[in-house]
Image (cartoon, rainbow, N blue to C red):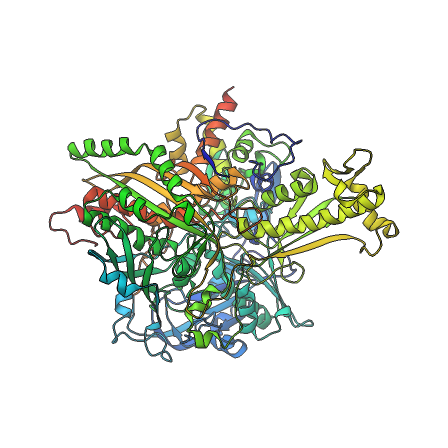
Amino acid sequence: MSYCSKDGRTTISLEVDGKRVKAAVSPRLLLSDFLRGPCAAKGVHVGCEHGVCGACTVRVDGQAVRACLMLAIQTDGSRVETVKVLGIADAMHPLQERFQARHALQCGFCTPGILISAQTYLREHPAPTRRDIEELLSGHLCRCTGYTPIVDAILDAAELERR
Amino acid sequence: MEASRASETATVLPLTAPNPARRTWVGAATLRAEDPALLTGEGRFIDDLSPFPSEHHAAILRSPYAHARITRLDVKPALALEGVTAVITGADVSAACKPFPVGIETRPVFYPCAIDRVRYMGEPVAVVVAEDRYIAEDALELIDVGYDPLAPVVEIEDALHADSLPLHEAVGSNVVHDRSFAYGDVDGAFANAEEFVEAKFVFPKYASTPIETYGVIAHYQRAADTYVVHANFHGPFILHSLMAQALQIPSNRLRIVVPPDIGGSYGIKSAVYPYIVLIALASKIAGVPVRWIEDRIEHLCASSSSTDRVTWARAAVLKDGTILGLHLDQVDNTGAYVRAPEPACLYRMHGTVTGAYRIPAVAIRNRLVSTNKLPTGLNRGYGGQEQYFTLERLVALVAKRLGLDVIEVVRRNLLRKEEFPYHAPAGSVYDSGDYHAALEHALELADYPALMAGRESARAEGRLVGIGIGCIVEPSGSNMGYISIALPKDLRDRSLPKSGCTEAATIAIDPLGAVTVRLSTTPQGQGHRTVAAQIVAQELGLEPKQVEVLAELDTQTSAWSIASGSYSSRFAPVAAVAIRNAARKVAYKLKAIAAHQFGVAFEDVDLVEGAARSADGTHVTSLKRIAGAAHWNPSSLPDGMEPGIYETAYYSIGLLRPPDDDDRVDSSAVYGFVVDLALVEVDSRTGRVDVKQYVTVHDSGTVLNPMIVDGQIRGGFAHGLGGALFEEIAYDENGTLRSGTLADYPIPTASELPTIVIGHVDVPSPFTPLGAKGVGEGNAMSVPVVIANAVADALGANEVRLPLVPHRVWEMLQPNAVEAR
């Protein structure tokens, strides 16, 4: 698959989920397309491409960002983390475990972005209130769950991490 | 057989799965098999798949006009762009394709792409196929299109005017369908009435937009003359027949493969099917496999939505609140085309039109209009929210007119449990229920007397507080025959009668004894794999984790039928039974082999904890060995038994018939029930509606997995509240879309959705072996009108128009406000 062959390419090197990546990319290539395409990070989901739904949220140098609102070339020299960094199926992160226990996902399309946001937030806010989590989630759209179980799962995970 | 329980929402659930020794998996809150992959970024959604090598990418040019003639279309500059493979236009489509079949007699012509006229903003005009999506989008800008704008028709009542410009010249009118029905002694009901309550109800157009958009990956394989298409399409698979007819190919040359994961749909993705045809043609013309992933802007202007409806309704009542009869004059707007399964929006609730009440007589006039708006289709609740908006507002207005408490009017008319099975006048046969017990449970959970007292004291302080109620029948498992009621009997009689709600499932046991189940229910998050494993584990004496369930549907290799797919809440009442029946076939074979090997009677063998056992306990052989005999050593099988273990079961509820000669139809397989109570407060300064309390009590029959059932209820509530307070696919007077981004189309977020209280009064269905009823759509049907009733109560208003966005409510609050802005 060619990406943006029309434009002159720029070589970038970065770290994606702990692996070094070096690639020649078009200046206009979105980070979301770069991650899903050449990096095969299929856990980055694209829902709106205008920064509202939050499904494509990833971490760039420790900050949660919308991968659809960034260009790949902006991540040259950065450390990019997707949902892959949380845990794997037989060794899930407490957030992932609580999402399953609370039935906080149904179709699962919005879930990876929410997990990244929640993990990033809890690092700096270990004892959030329910209202805090609702605020945090205002940057994410979920159409399946009605959010209540998601809020519960994140509060559970915060409590487990504090123990 | 009744069970009553209130869900817990505050306590931390245990992390461990239920006791693995228990055999009754059905009904357990088993953790979902789907979750580990979805939580770790290993879901397999349509855009994650690469089924074909050397694929190209499509982008679609769309009309900027609501209504215009195409006067010029020059694609040469686009074709000249490096990296562009092909450009497909309406001329290619009309040359290769027939219009899709349409289920009404006027048959407005519908192709997957505009031919010479555009009829809604966003309608496809051309498809570019290029090496990548970026180049394809660049090329769209190079296509030169000339448009000659035509007068747009936007609102339902505009379309009813004889002088509105017909969208479909061959039809000659924007009223494309008009049928009248009468059930029971309607004239007698109105002659005996002591009061009449009459009102006009307007229900908006909105869309339960999924977060994953449409996706199609098509490959025309020339040697086989076959289209292989991967798409996040979830049925109904009757639409496969329509696609094959449009493509003019034998239906076994259209192979549709549905990915294991679909990122939500709520009905909306059913309408990806015209794009399946369009991208399939693009693949044939371009000579390469083609991937098209819809973007969000395309989705909001050109995917699908619910119908908007205007109803003029009249109720004949007695002074004690008894409803004797109804007159309903309903007009649905299916947008620019009547895209199948429309006009089903008007008919899904047809047999159920009298809802949860004993209303013996009803007259209905159903019309459909065409306007220059996005075509409509399945949307969670489909037809129910429109129907109950009329019926439950009407009940509230009856109570207000008669000076009665609305609960009293509800109680007077609500069906009693001894009336089941209840034959509703328009044809539905309600299987079971205890509606009064559910109502009492809701009143108890809400502490209704305290709610009333709270409202009075708030009002005494000058606050705008209101209570809303709704009692709705939740149909599930659509009867495929109901749509044909759109045709008059003489036209119906010319084609094959249709009925039933058939679903299939296949179960195989391999040579090492491992069990695999194949579904045709195309789930989009409802946990079908989990529940199927529970059912099969219970039947075969296994644990759910030993049962592998595949959700991929492949029309060439799966067992499926016209009703297959995921819509009309059909998993619990129908598909779950097909799964159970397939498991029983497998269990029968395993027991027969074991009985033969043990030398005991068939009845003396049981399947327990992964083994076949004789009743006296002297023989125990693992399932692996029993099943293995069918593969490794057929000579050891009972005489006449086929080797291998691979069983398919098809199931439909036998009671479902085609419409009868008097236009009665039992439109669904089974009927659940929902009672909702809401307390809202309106901010008089801003018009903001705050939902202070929401109680919902459900009858979903036998609960297969209570965790998943309550998840479906919360999801349905979120969709209902979105429709009640926020969402509208809005157009200006020129037919220009005003809600074209997710910033302009406000989907509720965590801050806007209250935590709800869920209760159950579950009465198993006697019509299906498992007793389960559908559950995911009830609140999508009930919440819009319950919130409307609560806001009407808070403001003392008779007319309420959804969505109740702050500016609309604020305008209602102004002195001299014109009602129903």
> x%, y% of residue B305?
40, 58
Depth check: give the residue in front, B733 or B576. Answer: B576
> x%, y% of residue B479?
50, 60
Q: In which quarter of the image is the C terminus of chain B?
A: bottom left
Q: Residue at x 64, y 69 (%)?
A: B252
Horizontally, is B539 left or right of B12 in the view? right
Q: Which residue is drawn at 60% across and 36% down?
A: A18
> x%, y% of residue B556?
66, 63
Which residue in the rendered view is the most extreme toward the top?
A163
Depicted B174 relative to depicted A47: above or below? below
Can residue A53 be seen here? The reply is no
Horizontally, is B557 left or right of B292 in the view? right
Which residue in the rendered view is the most extreme toward the right?
B635
**Quarter residue B349 falls in:** bottom left
Number of numbered markers = 0
Horizontally, is B118 left or right of B654 in the view? left
Depth check: give the residue in front, B228 or B384. Answer: B384
Horizontally, is A93 left or right of B200 in the view? right
Can residue B791 be seen here? The reply is yes
